[in-house]
Amino acid sequence: MKRCKRLFEKAKAFRAEHPHTHIDAMHQLKQHLAESEQSAQIPGWVLAGWCGDDACEEGVKEETKFTTRNILCDPPKTKNTCLHCGKEAKHIVWFARAY
Ligand SMILES: [Zn+2]
């Protein structure tokens, strides 16, 4: 079984757990965080594009405390741009905070 496939199997277990697939840019992620805090909900899992650059992963982490969790072979939704830099996405990943 390919590595990403195995991770996807794991990710499926989380899919029912507060997934958000509508977030495509940092300002949307930050708005989502603000709304989650306001309504006392956990921000959950965010599906996003990632260009593959470590600097973007680091940037997301610094700004929102979100880290990449799973790279999907068969994502529920296609993302064309990197969440952080807006360049072409090479991967589609789940971002989440450690709880
Ligand atoms: Zn990027």
Image (cartoon, grey):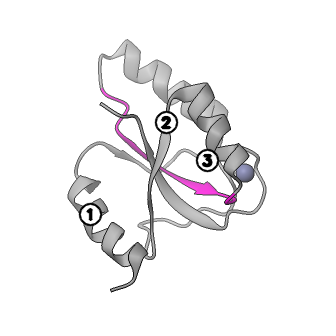
Mark 2 — residue?
A: 66
Sort mark 3 into few (<14), some (14-19) or many (20+) by Cα contacts within 10 Å: many
Residue beneath the point at 62% across and 45% down: 57
Instruction: Evaluate if marks 1 and 3 touch, with contact meaning CB atoms under 8 Å apart.
Output: no
Mark 1 or mark 2, which has the lower sequence index? Answer: 1
Mark 2 belongs to which amino acid? Phe
In the image, the segment drawn in magenta is: 42-52
- Total marks in image: 3
Q: Secondary structure at mark 3?
A: loop
Gap in angstroms between the C-alphas marked 1 and 3:
23 Å
Label 1: which secondary element: helix
At label 1, counting other C-alpha atoms closer than 10 Å, the crowd grade (few under 14, some 14-19, many 20 or more) is few
Residue type (three-letter) at the residue carrying disc 3: Asp
Q: Which residue is mark 3?
A: 24
Q: Within 8 Å of ligand 1, the CB of disc 2? A: no
Which residue position is annotated with label 1? 10
Label 3 vs label 2, nearer the camera? 2
Asked if 47 appears above or below 72 in the picture, the reply is above
Q: Residue at 49% x, 36% y: name it.
A: 66
Three-letter code, disc 1? Lys
- Measured in 3D between alpha carbons, the distance from the residue under mark 3 to the one under mark 2, in whole angstroms, is 14 Å
Q: Earlier in the sequence, mark 3 or mark 2?
A: 3
Taking the image as shown, residue 49 lies to the left or right of residue 75, namely right
Q: Is residue 96 magenta?
A: no
Location of residue 27 in the rendering, given as x and y in whole percent from the top left corner:
65, 31
Q: Along the line of sight, which residue is nearer the eye, 30 or 54?
A: 54
Q: Which of the 4 quarters of the picture holds residue 58?
A: top right
Which one is in front in this view, the residue at disc 1 or the one at disc 3? 1
Left or right of residue 21: residue 84: right
The image shows residue 91 at horizontal and vertical percentages of 59, 65
| Secondary structure of the residue carrying numbered label 2 | loop
Q: Earlier in the sequence, mark 1 or mark 3?
A: 1
